[in-house]
Image: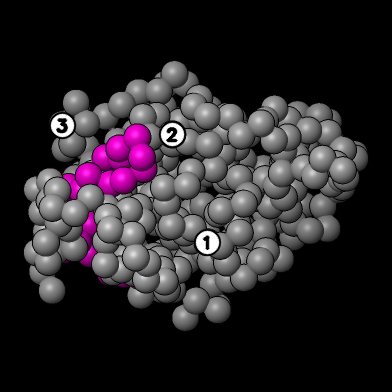
């Protein structure tokens, strides 16, 4: 199943599943998220709202677990459906005394709300997480960009660089104002991936662990194909738009036809909600936090 959804031109560790959930399921998830108590939401400096479920991290990157909501584990049982697509969340057994027995399943959920014009700087999620992430998009499309670090001896490609990247810390929940890695990153993305509503994106291995991902703070995404004008002929503010969309062949056929006919597809952003599932590898033993048992975190067996 996963092979048909591999994103062309990227390492074999990126998959895109359009219409992973139905419209009815999307509406149900939107309603459940809207019912979240206001104190659960955190607003970061950029104005973006977020919340995380499944537990919190200690300063030593150990998860103090809490039960995920039933809409993750029961209906529409997102976690089981995600893990049926690939085995990227399965880790080799370890001997760490606080490491949870490997379930091969995510155990933490980050919810991000992106209003038009909001984004997040290129970043890594940090060493607490197993090198895999699964993201379900709701309500509005949006592009995510994949960046690479620049070698100190050979800064190409490209020659221009942006500010040093950030690594998300425990307290900012995927904001990028915490620990700087001190390494220069390429100004032009390595790849752009267009996330349609109800889609699932999975990144793993080096694309998650040694590359960076970010979302531009723009109100429109301009999708181009591999034969569009090259970056050299674009104005500076359109450089990221000149990067071909990597998952073009997996998108809605109407989008593909528009790009073939017109050379581009302009997508106006609305408010997008993302459900990002990750796996914290070190879990505090005995700290059930509302249900880490067999009927807690992952629902009924």
Query: Which circle, 3 or 1, is nearer the viewer?
Result: 1
Secondary element at image label 1: strand
Q: Camera-side residue: 227 or 66?
A: 66
Can the viewer see residue 160?
Answer: yes
- 121 relative to 14, above or below: above
- Left or right: residue 264 versus residue 108 is right
Q: Locate residue 285, reporting x and y percent.
A: 19, 54
Q: Residues within 10 Å of mark 2 (few under 14, many from 20)?
A: many
Q: Camera-side residue: 114 or 72?
A: 72
Which residues make up the magenta segment? 56-83
Q: Camera-side residue: 86 or 235?
A: 86
From mark 3 to mark 1, how far is it between C-alphas? 32 Å
Rendering quarter of residue 145: top right
Q: Residue at x 54, y 43 (%)?
A: 124
Q: Locate residue 274, reporting x and y percent.
A: 39, 45
Can the viewer see residue 75?
Answer: no
- Left or right: residue 161 versus residue 117 is right
Residue hosting label 1: 204
Residues tagged 2 and 1 counted as in contact (Cβ below 8 A): no
Q: Residue at x 83, y 33 (%)?
A: 160
Name which of mark 2 and mark 1 comes first in the sequence: 2
Secondary element at image label 2: loop
Q: Is residue 284 magenta?
A: no
Q: Which mark is residue 37?
A: 3
Q: Residue at x 26, y 40 (%)?
A: 56
Q: Residue at x 60, y 57 (%)?
A: 207
Residue hosting label 2: 169
């Amino acid at each position: 199943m996963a092979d048909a959804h591999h994103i062309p031109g990227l390492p074999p560790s990126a998959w895109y599943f359009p219409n992973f959930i139905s419209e009815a399921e999307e509406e149900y998830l939107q309603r459940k998220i809207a019912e979240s108590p206001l104190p659960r939401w955190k607003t970061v400096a950029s104005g973006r709202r977020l919340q995380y479920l499944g537990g919190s991290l200690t300063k030593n990157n150990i998860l103090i677990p809490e039960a995920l909501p039933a809409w993750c584990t029961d209906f529409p049982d997102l976690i089981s459906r995600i893990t049926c697509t690939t085995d990227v969340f399965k880790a080799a057994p370890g001997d760490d005394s606080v490491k949870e027995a490997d379930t091969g399943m995510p155990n933490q959920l980050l919810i991000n709300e992106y209003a038009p014009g909001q984004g997040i700087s290129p970043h890594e999620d940090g060493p607490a997480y197993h090198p895999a992430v699964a993201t379900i998009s709701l309500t509005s499309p949006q592009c995510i960009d994949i960046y690479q670090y620049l070698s100190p001896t050979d800064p190409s490609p490209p020659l221009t660089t942006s500010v040093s990247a950030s690594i998300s810390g425990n307290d900012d929940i995927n904001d990028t104002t915490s620990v700087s890695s001190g390494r220069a990153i390429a100004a032009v993305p390595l790849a752009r991936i267009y996330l349609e509503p109800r889609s699932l994106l999975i990144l793993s291995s080096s694309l998650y662990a040694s590359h960076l991902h970010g979302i531009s703070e723009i109100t429109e995404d301009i999708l181009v194909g591999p034969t569009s004008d090259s970056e050299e002929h674009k104005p500076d503010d359109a450089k990221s738009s000149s990067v071909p969309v990597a998952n073009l062949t997996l998108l809605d056929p109407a989008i593909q036809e528009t790009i073939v006919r017109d050379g581009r597809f302009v997508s106006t952003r609305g408010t997008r909600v993302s459900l990002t599932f990750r796996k914290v590898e070190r879990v505090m033993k005995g700290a059930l936090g509302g249900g880490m048992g067999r009927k807690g975190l992952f629902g009924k067996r």
